[in-house]
Amino acid sequence: MQSIFKLAVSGVQQLIPYTPGKSIEELERELGLSHIVKLASNENPLGPGTKVQQAIQNTVAELSRYPDGNGFALKQALAEKHQLASSQITLGNGSNEILELVARTFLTPAHEVVFSQHAFAVYPLVTQAVGATACVVKALDYGHDLNAMLNSINDKTRLVFIANPNNPTGTLLAEKDLEAFIAALPESVICVLDEAYYEFVAEDKRANSIVWLEKFPNLIITRTFSKAYGLAGLRVGYSFSSAEMADLLNRVRQPFNNNSMALAAAEAALTDEEYLIKTIALNKQGMQQLTQAFTGLGLSWIPSSGNFVSVDMRQAAMPIYESLLKKGVIVRPVANYEMPNHLRISMGTEDENLFFITALKGVLSELG
Ligand SMILES: *Cc1c(COP(=O)(O)O)cnc(C)c1O
């Protein structure tokens, strides 16, 4: 029988699929463990807030109807919060979908896309899927080397991805450097500024990127409800851009890409200031708890502005990851990010963090 593999477009043939963090159910099946702590996907350890849960309940009776394909209410709430026009907002099935929409809107196989080494794994995926060529720029201290990225831009470059903070390194760019970088880009290069962890950045270190939209028509800022707002399972992301850019993305977007529950939940999440404050405080405490433990174990880590931290195990991290699994802790190996000695740990609750720290101590002493 003839294989259909070679019928696929060449970018897709070469794609290596995204590896998600192992799920709790999967580990339960494999090892029959009952107490499992997952610190692997930068999810919110608080679970969804009560306002969100109520909003979802309220949608149930209407589930036989199609959702609002324009996400009118959610866009309006976002527009009000950020003092933008609704026409500048695009909603995605996770901000991942927006990254993909941008690629499909602006890239052909003739184009190049610039992003950093150790940057978010979805950038190479969406680039390759449309047959464009990735230009991966060597990182500087695990962060984006903006000068090197600028230098790598040529006539074929159509798109640049910047993750700020970056996942899995947690590195943050200074506001001034970032603004100068975008200003220096040719107008023919679209800049995606991925701010999936924006809410976790200390207020005095956050870039006020939204005001840049007025002067940079090639800028698009993406954010998400998956992390700080605790809605990873519902898939809601959004972008801010010029109305012209949003209109283009809208043409490519599926008409009902956000479901009714997701739209209602996201709108409710925006009103739950208390949940957000609690989330940020818990994250700060968790970061202290984990990094103090690392210091105690003589391990170094990459200072992180996100809700996760990548710690250097000073040896191949995969065996440590496997041993942690056997103790019921799921963390994230990042060898696919060219960081074979690091593990990325998402902040959990205090108890979850403690469970991980105890397991890590056990694993390290067993390994000698
Ligand atoms: C988690 C993450 C996203 C977004 O994920 P969605 O759930 O699709 O919104 C985007 N960028 C980075 C860098 C991330 O880590």
Image (spheres, grey):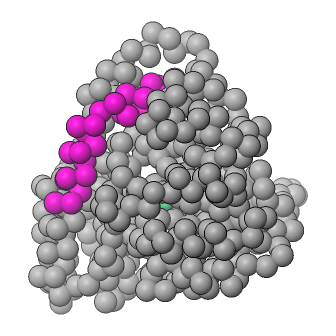
* Residue 89 to residue 150: above or below: above
Residue 269, quarter of the rendered image: top left
- In the depicted structure, whether residue 53 falls above or below residue 129: above
Q: Is residue 348 above or below residue 131?
A: above
**In x, y percent, where is residue 187?**
76, 64
Left or right relative to 131: residue 42:
left
| Magenta stretch holds residue 282 | yes
Say left or right for 164 vs 147: left
Q: Position of residue 170 (x, y in %)?
A: 39, 69
* Along the line of sight, the residue nearer the viewer: 330 or 200: 200
Q: Main secondary structure of the magenta part?
A: helix
Above or below: residue 241 compared with residue 56: below
Q: What quarter of the picture does the C terminus occupy?
A: bottom left
User: Is residue 78 visible to the viewer in this orientation of the structure?
Assistant: no
Q: Residue at x 85, y 65 (%)?
A: 109
Q: Position of residue 57 (x, y in %)?
A: 36, 18
| Region rendered in magenta | 260-285
User: In front: 306, or 7?
Assistant: 306
Residue at x 52% of width, y 28% of height: 76
Residue 360, picture quadrant:
bottom left
Front-most of 90 and 255? Answer: 90
